[in-house]
Amino acid sequence: MTEQRFGDPHHLATAKVIVGVDGSDGSWTALRWAARFAAERRRELEILHGMDLVGAGWVLGDYEVVVPSVVDAIREQGQDVVARAERVARSVAPELPISVRVTTDTGKQLLIEHSAEAYAVVIGATGDAGTFAHLGSTLLAVTAHAQGTVVIVRTDPDADGAVRTSGPVVVGVDGSPVGDAAIAAAFTEAAERGVELVAVHVWSDWDSGRFAGHSNLVEAELDNVERAILAERIAGWQEKFPGVRVTRKVEVSAPAPHLLDWSKIAQLLVVGSRGRGGFAGMLLGSTANTLVQHASCPVMVVHPAR
């Protein structure tokens, strides 16, 4: 059962699963995933579509945008998108409560704004585009600036673009208190899905001793320290979720490549929005940034409570 947390707007009974649709193939994949997710979590699904009339103004010119026929065409296209989206969602989960919202804002503005009270925000991603292709896109903007939980629905490149539904839930554990929200979400997901949870902790030789409160430790001692950190971080959650089988993995360095490898067999990858080495002003850490662009399964990025 989904954990209810007092005072947390993301876990109120009224908190919805919100999915953004724009008519792209990636958004339809995300919509189907979000509909199943909402139904399994007994949550209402809200479908959001931003028409971006301001953006249209840059393309067509201010005069053209205020011409009723142009505005009407944009609005009609938006209504067509959400109407199709509702049909697709109901084909996945016929009994699912669904609401729709269409505004003149951009999709990313809408999703970021409504993330404050959402159970989760779901967006689509396809392919394996690099950083520059995604820079400033809805994908990275929403992942970085939204509150609570954001799920980027990535497909399996070895399965003809399907979303993997088997395999473990994998969580990246950075050893910091900031990462506890990701651990909590990962245990919840593993329990809901009835699958194994793989907790992957990666420490870098340049900072692990300092972080653990030790210095001048040989590698074997550091490994023991980091294993103890991992055990400590997940111990309380194992008590809360005794039915979840946990496998612990400790690696020496480079968290992103290790987690990318796990994404090839996982059904969900869970990470915090910032790692222990991230700058305070960074809303999205380098590991999360890499995973949302290149993982082979859906990625859940969990922001700490503000």
Image: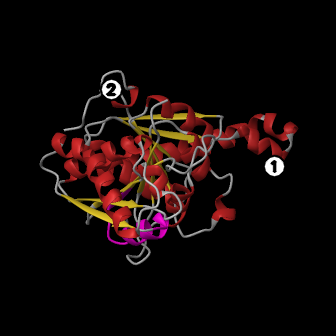
The residue sitting at 40% across, 69% down in the picture is: 219
Res. 59 mark: 1
Image coords of residue 162 (percent x, y): 38, 68
- The quadrant holding residue 202 is bottom left
Q: Circle 2 sits in a helix, a strand or a loop, which is it?
A: loop
The residue at the point 44 percent across, 28 percent down is 117
Camera-nearest residue between 235 and 301: 235
Residue 168, numbered label: none
Give me the residue at 34% from left, 57% from top.
Answer: 225
- Where does the magenta region start and end? 253-269
Q: Position of residue 176 (x, y in %)?
A: 42, 45
Q: Is residue 230 above or below residue 150?
A: below
Label 1: few (<14), some (14–19) or many (≥20) C-alpha neighbours in 10 Å? few
- Viewer-closest of 112 and 104: 112
- For image coordinates 30% across by 59% down, the residue present is 227
Question: Is-magenta flag for residue 192?
Answer: no
Q: Is residue 305 left or right of residue 38?
A: right
Q: Which residue is mark 2?
A: 12
**Residue 193 relative to residue 135: left or right:** left
Q: Magenta stretch containing residue 266, yes or no?
A: yes
**What amino acid does circle 1 point to?**
Val
Graded by Cα atoms within 10 Å as few (under 14), some (14 to 19) or many (20 or more), the crowding at tag 2 reads some
78 shown above or below 209: above
Q: Quadrant of the N terminus?
A: top left
Q: Earlier in the sequence, mark 2 or mark 1?
A: 2
Label 2 amino acid?
Leu
Question: The residue tagged with tag 1: helix, strand or loop?
Answer: helix
State whether residue 164 appears in this view: no
